[in-house]
Amino acid sequence: MSRSLKKGPYVDERLFRKVIVARNTSSHIPIRVWDRACTIVPEFVGTTFDVHNGKTFHKVYVTEEMVGHKLGEFAPTRTFRAHTARAAAAKPA
């Protein structure tokens, strides 16, 4: 279920302030973020974030196409480890 339109998008207030300060100082240092549920707003465009995926941080550079999505969508939490050997053996060489 999505968030109520009456409430508007969820944006962490502290994170928003950090982005505004970074833009005013022309800082290119990535902002560390643990809040994966935070919605990307137009003010975030051009900012680099380090989004935590539960284990490590992933660099995410925000572009215009990302507006409206969540930060967590761009930091995958699962790593794909190849298919089993059994499936590879069944495939003819």
Image (cartoon, helix red, strand yellow):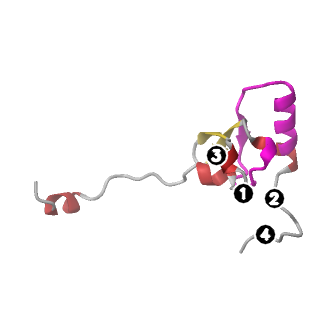
Q: Hey, which quadrant is residue 38 in on the image?
A: bottom right
Q: Residues within 10 Å of mark 2 (few under 14, many from 20)?
A: few
Closer to the eye: label 2 or 3: 2
User: Which numbered marker is on residue 37?
Assistant: 1
* Residue type, label 4: Arg
Dot 4 or dot 3: first in sequence order is 4
Left or right, residue 7 beside residue 48: right
The percent coordinates of residue 82 (x first, y second) are 32, 53
Residues under numbered marks 2 and 4 in contact, where contact means CB atoms less than 8 Å apart = yes
Q: Residues under labels 2 and 4: Cα distance?
A: 8 Å
User: Which numbered marker is on residue 8?
Assistant: none
The percent coordinates of residue 2 (x first, y second) are 74, 71
Dot 4 or dot 1: first in sequence order is 4
Give the residue at mark 4. Answer: 3
Magenta residues (range)? 16-43
* Residue type, label 1: Ala
Dot 3 or dot 1: first in sequence order is 1
User: Which numbered marker is on residue 10?
Assistant: 2
Closer to the eye: label 4 or 3: 4
Q: Residues under labels 4 and 3: Cα distance?
A: 23 Å
